[in-house]
Image: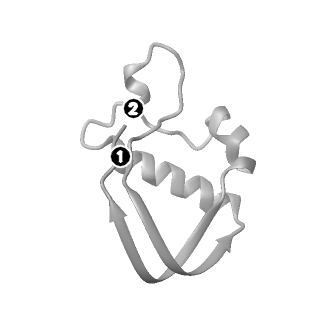
């Protein structure tokens, strides 16, 4: 859900698709890369109106960076399922 629909300050959440991937996983340890990825993902998912912009100095985001993992998957195969809540 876009934070633009809430009256309070809120980080974004989104409905999603369920995907099963098989392959090799590489952890990315850089908090700077994680932060840039979250900002880019928010820009993409908030398009085209951009009612919510995740700023690099957002205190809520910065406080959650230690609890979010980022990784790359080099896929051998994948399976998907459309699942919206």
Residue at horizontal 52 percent and vertical 15 percent from the top = 8
Q: Is residue 29 above or below residue 31?
A: below
- Label 1 crowding class (10 Å Cα cut-off): few <14, some 14-19, many 20+? some
Q: Residue furthest left?
A: 48
Question: Which numbered disc flags the more N-terminal residue, 2 or 1?
Answer: 2
Using residue 78 as the reference point, say whether residue 47 is left or right of it.
Answer: left
Way the structure is coloured = one colour
Q: Quadrant of the C terminus?
A: top left
Q: Residue furthest top?
A: 7
Q: Quadrant of the N terminus?
A: top left
Residue 22 disc label? none
Which quarter of the picture shows residue 26?
bottom right
Which residue has dot 1 on it? 45
- Label 2 crowding class (10 Å Cα cut-off): few <14, some 14-19, many 20+? some
Depth order, front residue of 83/46: 83
Q: Is residue 65 above or below residue 24?
A: above
* Image location of residue 79, percent across then percent down: 37, 71
Q: Is residue 18 above or below residue 5?
A: below
* Image location of residue 81, percent across then percent down: 33, 59
Residue at horizontal 72 percent and vertical 48 percent from the top = 67
* Image location of residue 32, percent across then percent down: 65, 59
Give the structural element (helix, strand or loop) at label 1: helix
Which residue has dot 2 on it? 2
* Image location of residue 64, percent across then percent down: 69, 42
Query: Do callouts 2 and 1 mark residues in contact (Cβ within 8 Å)?
Result: yes
Give the structural element (helix, strand or loop) at label 2: loop
């Amino acid at each position: 859900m876009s934070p633009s629909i809430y009256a309070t300050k809120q980080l974004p959440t989104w409905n999603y698709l369920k995907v099963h991937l098989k392959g090799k996983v590489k952890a990315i340890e850089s908090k700077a890369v994680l932060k840039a990825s979250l900002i880019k993902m928010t820009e993409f998912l908030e398009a085209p109106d951009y009612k919510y912009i995740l700023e690099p100095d957002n205190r809520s985001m910065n406080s959650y960076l230690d609890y979010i993992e980022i990784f790359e998957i080099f896929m051998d195969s994948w399976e998907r399922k459309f699942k919206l809540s």
